[in-house]
Image: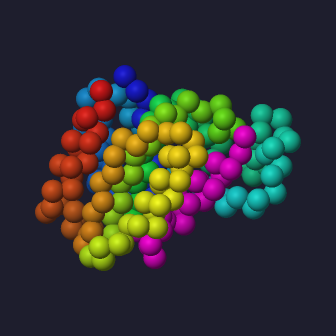
């Protein structure tokens, strides 16, 4: 049984990204402990690149925000799943702030072994996800993580659009495959 943290990068609490993440979580929860962390519920400031976390006790960031709680959740995670809407060929700014704040030696205390990716974009472009997939692969390679897989959904814009396509079942099955 793995501990899975799903980072949902949409500010829409009940939007398509949250729905896709929920479907994944339902499948994964059959055999794992699952926690969803939504950026809509968190106040995380951007990293300012000061590197003070490299010399502060416990590698703590000087910024006092919700990243403290996210670090604790990630410290106990075996698998992290990133779920994001795609804005201008990248993950959401709020989610990017969390990712950037992982530029800390504290991440060396994490036990994360696997990473997954759930993306939703309004466009139908064949290369819509390429920049994010490149970054995803670089993170996998750098940290020597195993990919659990990806669910990439095109043509989903308005709240509820995801309900009429196979992506929810695909996300559920990906979650359920984690035994």
Q: 138 left or right of 108?
A: left
Q: Quadrant of the N terminus?
A: top left
Can residue 149 be seen?
A: yes
Residue 160 placement (x, y as % from top left): 22, 65
Q: 137 left or right of 27?
A: right
Against 88, residue 130 (above or below) is: above
Task: Tell me how the rendering is colored.
Answer: rainbow
Locate residue 148: give its quadrant. top left
Residue 2 placement (x, y as % from top left): 40, 27
Residue at 25%, 48% (x, y): give it. Answer: 171
Residue 12 placement (x, y as % from top left): 39, 63
- Compare residues 144 and 100 and report the one nearer the observer: 144
- Compare residues 60 and 166 and report the one nearer the observer: 166
Residue 61 placement (x, y as % from top left): 76, 47
Residue at 53%, 46% (x, y): give it. Answer: 141
Locate residue 87: give its quadrant. bottom left
Q: Is residue 169 magenta?
A: no
How many marks do you count on the picture?
Answer: 0
Q: Residue furthest top?
A: 1
Q: Residue furthest right?
A: 55
Residue at 30%, 60% (x, y): give it. Answer: 152
- Compare residues 175 and 21 and report the one nearer the observer: 175
Please report the bounds of the magenta region as a residue range. Answer: 86-105
Against 83, residue 28 (above or below) is: above
Q: Quadrant of the C terminus?
A: top left
Can residue 5 be seen?
A: no
Residue at 75%, 52% (x, y): give it. Answer: 63
């Amino acid at each position: 049984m793995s501990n899975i943290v799903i980072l949902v990068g949409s500010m829409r609490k009940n939007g398509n990204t949250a729905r896709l993440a929920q479907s994944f979580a339902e499948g994964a929860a059959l055999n794992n402990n699952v926690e969803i962390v939504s950026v809509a519920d968190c106040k995380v400031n951007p990293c300012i690149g000061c590197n003070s976390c490299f010399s502060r006790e416990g590698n703590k960031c000087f910024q006092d925000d919700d990243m403290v709680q996210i670090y604790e959740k990630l410290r106990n995670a075996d698998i992290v799943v990133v779920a994001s809407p795609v804005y201008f060929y990248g993950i959401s700014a709020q989610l990017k702030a969390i990712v950037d704040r992982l530029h800390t030696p504290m991440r060396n205390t994490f036990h994360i072994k696997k990473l997954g990716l759930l993306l939703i974009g309004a466009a139908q472009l064949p290369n819509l996800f390429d920049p994010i997939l490149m970054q995803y692969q670089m993170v996998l390679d750098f940290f020597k993580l195993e990919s659990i897989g990806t669910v990439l959904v095109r043509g989903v814009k308005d709240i509820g659009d995801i309900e009429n396509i196979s992506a929810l079942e695909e996300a559920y099955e990906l979650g359920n495959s984690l035994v």
